[in-house]
Image: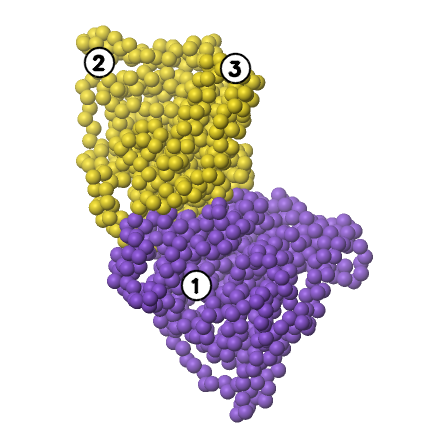
Chain colours: A yellow, B purple
Amino acid sequence: MFFPIQSEHCFISLFLSSWASVDHPIHAPPTSGDPFKVTFDPPAHCKLRFEGGVMTVTPGPDSERKSFNWPHPNLEDFLKDQNMMFALISDGPLMSFCYRRLSYLSNKYQLHVLLNEMKESAAQKEVPHRDFYNVHKVDTHVHASSGMNQKHLLRFIKKTMKNSKDDVVCRDKSGKEMTLAEVFKSMNLTPYDLSVDMLDVHADRNTFHRFDKFNAKYNPVGESRLREVFMKTDNHIGGRYFAKVIKEVMEDLEESKYQNAEFRLSIYGRAMDEWDKLAKWAVTHRMFSDNVRWMVQMPRLYVSFVSWVLNLDLVYTWTDLTNFQVSGFDSVDDESKPEHLMLDKDSPLPEDWTSPENPPYSYYLYYTFANLVVLNNFRRERGLSTFVLRPHCGEAGNVTHLVSGFMLAESVAHGLQLRKVPVLQYLFYLSQIGIAMSPLSNNSLFLNYHRNPLPDFFNRGLNVSLSTDDPLQFHFTKEPLMEEYSIAAQVWKLSTCDMCEIARNSVLQSGFPNEVKEHWLGPNHLNEGIGGNDVSRTNVPDIRIAYRYHTLVDELRCICRGAKGSGDHGDGVAEKPL
Amino acid sequence: MFFPIQSEHCFISLFLSSWASVDHPIHAPPTSGDPFKVTFDPPAHCKLRFEGGVMTVTPGPDSERKSFNWPHPNLEDFLKDQNMMFALISDGPLMSFCYRRLSYLSNKYQLHVLLNEMKESAAQKEVPHRDFYNVHKVDTHVHASSGMNQKHLLRFIKKTMKNSKDDVVCRDKSGKEMTLAEVFKSMNLTPYDLSVDMLDVHADRNTFHRFDKFNAKYNPVGESRLREVFMKTDNHIGGRYFAKVIKEVMEDLEESKYQNAEFRLSIYGRAMDEWDKLAKWAVTHRMFSDNVRWMVQMPRLYVSFVSWVLNLDLVYTWTDLTNFQVSGFDSVDDESKPEHLMLDKDSPLPEDWTSPENPPYSYYLYYTFANLVVLNNFRRERGLSTFVLRPHCGEAGNVTHLVSGFMLAESVAHGLQLRKVPVLQYLFYLSQIGIAMSPLSNNSLFLNYHRNPLPDFFNRGLNVSLSTDDPLQFHFTKEPLMEEYSIAAQVWKLSTCDMCEIARNSVLQSGFPNEVKEHWLGPNHLNEGIGGNDVSRTNVPDIRIAYRYHTLVDELRCICRGAKGSGDHGDGVAEKPL
């Protein structure tokens, strides 16, 4: 921690970069004006009807539009495609083909590294001023409620207890109001006594394959009351403390200048006014940072889901969300739970769901996606932002989750199970669907670090990024994202070039707007291949980008040849020159 | 990095700990007065004579003492013992015995953990205020010249170039003086251009098993000139820059409050006045911190060694060293280099060494130790501090290095090769010789992280600590020591209890004085077993300490039984109840 140097350095680099690329600096211009100034559009006068589990919108009588004909995926098509996918992933010859292509991609990459490592490193040294530390990186998967590390939360609790112990923070069972001091008294704890050990929020050997135990770790000192007071947006103090600690995390990110995050906030679906409460929390506490974007996560609880769709009409006009920069939706829960049902044409519609069983993963994903399509069309019409679907997918459990993810998701979190399904893994490669991986999280929950498939995925060219998931539970240092990168670099011997490529992937996967990405990655970052790469911002040499691009094109060409019936893929592979 | 919180917290904990344990705080009282005020004793009037490679001291004519009879190890005894050791480590039955005892210790520990993990964790939670973050830990093996991380060095160079580019910093080949600006010009570099990539000081895939390449990494931008200017104590600017950057590192340690380090400084033995120059550097720049102790490291170069012994007379009166808190000597070099000679009774004495071959490891270690014994006796007489021998040992190369280490060293750095020699490993366990391990360093040079024996050593009860070795080459974050602990904890699933035990080991191994350790570990830390443990300072539960103590006593008892001729060890093991 060399604060003097750092602030010093900030000044230098600011001053220098100002004459270096004054026309187009690497940092996007800071947001000006009041990001929370909401200008409500005139009412849309639409009818919202819940039809077959999907909200449909029809123009009101006095609207000039007679109807909206928005493309709208229907269950039948989805099921047809899904069955096709199921057939594909279990087709013997196809499995061998994909497995061989993946092995081929691994070996080809090894060759590339052996031949070009030095060139890549030289190319990076030629870039003035730029290195891994000052390329933009995004923590593509992190939950706000565990966005601070354990030491930070401890300090925050102690500080709060010191400065505002008389705040009324909650009600006890009898409904009597309690001050923070009384809460501590009820646990007979003094803030001085409190230690990281007592807090006991860190994952340990006993959380491995115990998602339930892991969830319990969210309760500091095992007290759901402390979680309620310090880590909720909707509580007796209107989430004031939580807002404050998250603001501190956001300040750390701003201080770091190049570290950014996409925080998940929960909609549980317990009450009809949750959406408004969440937006109100964000607006009241001005939860805004140029280094942060937000995602809404929904636990896969039936009640939550139904209320989610039934609440959609709120979201339809939820302009707050726009200003509070929500970029998409995440679907969260323990994927390792066994699923006894599956989505088929006979599955009851959400509005008719009565079974005590929880609907399966694909059920949630399909209906969420279908509703999002309509919602986005509507919001686009109204000039509002649109949302993407970036669910937790393939952390554990049935591989069919990844089929739904492949068909419906913009990108996924974890994707661990891809290691078991070559066909899907190959498809994720071909379609370059983003995968936000969190090896430290996996290491505590589902898969030991050295067995994590991230290095294989990365070598083969899958679009992977590094994310922290839950710094509160997994990380030790003051810079969780850097810690995540550091451990990956050390254990898997990643080169600076590899790390910069992963950082670049994280920006591409992230929900930050294009105007921002233009600064972080370069004005043409949407172009394919080296045309889209600006090494002076990404610090990824063109050699690497070219390799990835041409390799992908070759693979697609190989597939097309196959599709044109060029005969046995196997030979195709064997014949294929490097 | 939450500076506000931290400073806040500093205040709280200061304020709280003041009324918590005002009588005996966990921090030793800060050094008062001028640590560099040297009071020279009257001259000793002794004759120093170099006899058989060892300095001998005889009282001068006008001294009241007629002679000093200090015990002084002689080569013959050393060789006899060494041969015995060689016989032991290659004795078949003994190898099996030790191997079985070590496996037994591993399994016994596993049992202990399975049965007591929860108790240990509960015991830790009962300790008010204390956790892994606020127990004292010492970086037991770190080289000053690479004590800052790469980002820190980069910022320091940029800052220096910005503020003092006109300093005359060195002479070019022609002897003409050069300013810092001219140095950069000669490399045609602007400070703005400079990046971590250009600096190129970080170890990478290409340093694995290439100690030579690794050594080259010490030259920023591959320019020995920059190393000369920024990372030397003895250069054209009297090591001013180096002193400044190390002071910044020391400030970071003080800021962290609980992190401490033992920095190695080099004596190359190129000139006779090196000792004085080094001390002068330390005194001039007031290189002092309560969080730091110093060690002198000597590369195993013959010239260096000879000048070291020939220079001993300087060291005899080197009171500066005392004030500048040098706690011992380290012996450094590439151990993997093949050795063609070995120490025997026919080896020429240091003063007669003429062979172009470099003397073997054991030669350096024996003569260093022999001379240290005399030196320490002398300094003790004079009321000066004494020095310990804590060499690099067993990082690579011949296992016989570890034999010398076992016989002569207070503790060793690395000790990796112990994994190959069960007898020695068992002896290191029985004698509890400290081992400062640096798995991240090994990972880049000699052994992949997941193959590092540290977890095995630790489980068996060897006295291991964690150290960084070279943050400049290996670490990414702003807290190298915490990064080292974090990665170990994650990859090897260490519990908080394990980490606190390792931290405690690091303090015990360190050269900090007992008065300091009394604060860090407790007033009775010299006692064995739980009597010596103060859980309120170490955060290591008595259960763990008791387990380690009783296990060790059992092992020693088992050995004694064996010595009394209780017959076959093998059965002894089998019969031994848990």
Disc 1 is placed on an element classified as strand
Q: Nearer the viewer, mark 3 or mark 2?
A: 3
Mark 2 residue crowding within 10 angstroms, few (<14) / some (14–19) / many (20+) = few
Image quarter for residue B367? Answer: bottom right
| Residue occupying image coordinates x 30% and y 19% | A376
- The CA distance from mark 2 to mark 1 is 72 Å
Amino acid carrying mark 1 in the image:
Val
On the image, the x and y values in percent for residue B451 come to 58, 45
Residue B15 can be seen, yes or no:
no
Q: Nearer the viewer, mark 2 or mark 1?
A: 1
Mark 1 residue crowding within 10 angstroms, few (<14) / some (14–19) / many (20+) = many
Amino acid carrying mark 3 in the image:
Gly
| Along the viewing direction, whichever of A417 and B512 lies nearer the viewer | A417
Disc 3 is placed on an element classified as loop
| Along the viewing direction, whichever of A563 and B387 lies nearer the viewer | A563
- The CA distance from mark 3 to mark 2 is 57 Å
Is B63 displayed left or right of A467 in the figure? right
Is B149 displayed left or right of A67 in the figure? right
Q: Residue furthest front?
A: B174
Amino acid carrying mark 2 in the image:
His
The residue at which mark 3 appears reads as A567
On the image, the x and y values in percent for residue B143 come to 46, 60
Image quarter for residue B265? Answer: bottom left
Residue B340 can be seen, yes or no:
yes
The residue at which mark 1 appears reads as B292
Which numbered marker is on residue B82? none
Q: Nearer the viewer, mark 3 or mark 1?
A: 3
| Residue occupying image coordinates x 78% and y 62% | B564
| Along the viewing direction, whichever of B483 and A557 lies nearer the viewer | A557
Which numbered marker is on residue A45? 2
Pointers 3 and 1 in contact (C-beta within 8 Å): no
